[in-house]
Amino acid sequence: MRPLPRLTARLIVLAGLLLPWPAAAAGLAFVMNSGAASISLIDMSTHKELRRIPVLREPHHWAMSPDGKSLLIGDSSGNTVFFLNPITAKVQRTVVVADPYQLGFSPNGKYLVVNGLARNQIDVYDAATMKLAHRFPIRSMPSHLAYSPGSHRVFVTLQGTNRLVALDLRDMKVLWDKPVGNTPAGILWLNGKLLVCDMGTDYVQEIDPATGNEIGRIVTERGAHNLFLSPDRKTVWVNNRVSGTTSVVDAATLKVLRTYKIPGGPDDLSFAPDGKVWLTRRFAESVAVLDPATGKFSVIDVGRSPHGIFLSPNAPSPDRLAAAR
Amino acid sequence: MRDPFDLAAGWVQEHVLIPFLYAIGWMRWEEVSYGWALAAVYGLVQVTATLALCTPLERWRPVERWPDRKAVVVDVLYTLLSRVGVLPLVTFVLFYQVQVDVTGWLVDHGWVPPMLERLVPALMGHQILTFFCYAVILDASDYWRHRLSHMFRWWWALHALHHAQRQMTFWSDDRNHLLDDLIGFVWFAVIALAIGVPPLQFPLLVLVLRFVESLSHANVRLSFGTVGERLLVSPRFHRAHHGVLAAGQRSCNYGAVLPWWDMIFGTADFSRDFVPTGDPEADEAMANGSYLAQQWAGLRRFGAALIHRHAPG
């Protein structure tokens, strides 16, 4: 059979992509297998693992570039940041960076802060050039980070010393360094305050960003580890590592609305456009896809110790591409 | 498909270690505890698989029969400590931290940390091939570590503990003086840092290699044949290394997994056939003492060697 001319073929594929998407979320899920030196690529419509993208050693967390064109994945003991195309999942380039455990761009896109958990350092990069602008040697185990909406302050939890540190990115200085709970991890800026998960406790602390003082607590369950704001900004989802649960907190009242049992060490999560919630299960080598309406979840096998998860609903799923062809 | 050993380690982490760490307020160690759980589970699987496979072999065609096996009991303790207990934890934590510090320092100074996959990018994503490359390099370096441990008087004083066993079985692989283990760890760490060995990335494959090492010590009349003996270290080949005539500076067959290095560097001896093992010059405590007595005897011999009062065997 005579092959279709290239332009015609491309138009057919494009037409296929422009067709209405099915109700079940399409796209690709990127799962960082921190114990298997790989990133699992999952078809969100079929829940099938398509392939594994090899990295060097230990991928943990991700950040989306300000222009939306690159998904940055930090390979901490590989000392490398991988830049991936979030639509095609192709590796665009790699940049050598010391211990990129956790990373995040400031809301104004000017800074990239990289936490070196094992090296006890917080690095501030110029986001445009990827040049190191400043290093804060800090004790110890800088873990998660949150920016102030104005981008000039970043708050970092220090797991090793049970402290929370506020850094001024304009003057590159420490604003305050205060004790918090026990093994602080996930942190979120919400409605003018900071919410900090304390993995060694069963609560999330409310912190005044100006002073670093505790102003309240939200009791969830044992091992409050990480928290995420839902896309509609109405709820905060807290993963409790020890109890193996996920608590849904009302973002306005900060009351716990519901708790889901997700065994296997729930860690990071991401929200799909169809309303499902995708969670990594660190100790169960899998991802849970939770239907919040029913509380039931399905499981997708991935690599060892899955940590960060990024959903790319606009990426064309292979099935859809195949159908379009 | 999920790895059942990983799931077992995950279960231990989720249901035993994390609740324990939470209860005592040590949740900051939860990543480390998972590393230990993986190492311990794979270690336990190693020990169980070795026990299940080597015990029938040793009963089937033993090289030697002994009236009692008291001397073997201490070797069991060595194995459990080395593969399931504290040592995997120390090794994992220590090596991981050293690796992070060294490679991070290199990055800070504008260097790209060495790593086989950086040198040969085609290796990325090919786990078995990558592991094989790492294993070959580490085995070659271990050949030289082992050979040097026989050459230097002070080092041999420590390593003699491994050779003192007259009832050599598959349990004898981990029978080492702690200082000898420490030197071995530093040796491994330097080489591993130079080529960027990923800790705990290939636990299943490490398990296979450790099995070969255990099997090579087994009290079994087993040869891999003319060709096989030149591909993989067999019980027959390694027994020659433990022979009473091979103890000390002029030994042979130093290879742990691959006999290639002995063949290349002229130390291979394929002629010796299931010889008696032991070090005639070792203190009796090193052969038959308790764990602590063996360690103490090794330390005394080490001290004596340092002041040149004790000649090597």
Image (tube, grey):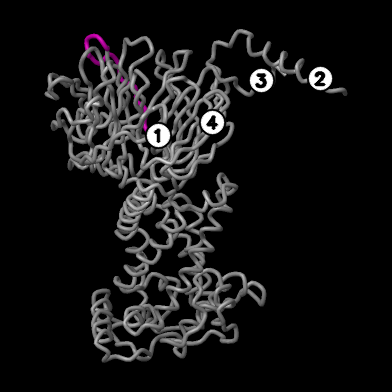
Comes first in the chain, label 1 or label 2: 2
Comes first in the chain, label 4 or label 3: 4
Image side of residue A183 versus residue B131, left or right: left
Give the residue type at disc 4. Answer: Leu
| Residue at mark 2 | A4
Q: SS of the residue at dot 3? A: helix
Q: Are marks 4 and 3 in contact (CB under 8 Å)?
A: no
* Residue displayed at 52% across by 68% down: B257
Q: Marks 4 and 3, how far apart in space?
A: 16 Å
Q: Are marks 3 and 1 in contact (CB under 8 Å)?
A: no
Chain name for mark 2? A
| Residue at mark 1 | A307
Can residue A263 be found in the magenta stretch? Answer: yes
Mark 3, residues whose alpha carbon is within 10 Å: few (<14), some, or many (≥20)?
A: some
| Residue at mark 3 | A321
Q: Are marks 2 and 4 in contact (CB under 8 Å)?
A: no
Q: Marks 2 and 4, how far apart in space?
A: 30 Å
Q: Marks 3 and 1, how far apart in space?
A: 28 Å
In magenta, the rendered stretch is A251-264
> Share a chain, discs 2 and 4?
yes
Residue A56 is situated, as x and y percent measured from the top left of the image, at 48, 44
Image side of residue A146 versus residue A161, left or right: right
Residue A41: give its label. 4
Comes first in the chain, label 3 or label 1: 1
* Residue displayed at 37% across by 75% down: B72
Give the residue type at disc 2. Answer: Leu
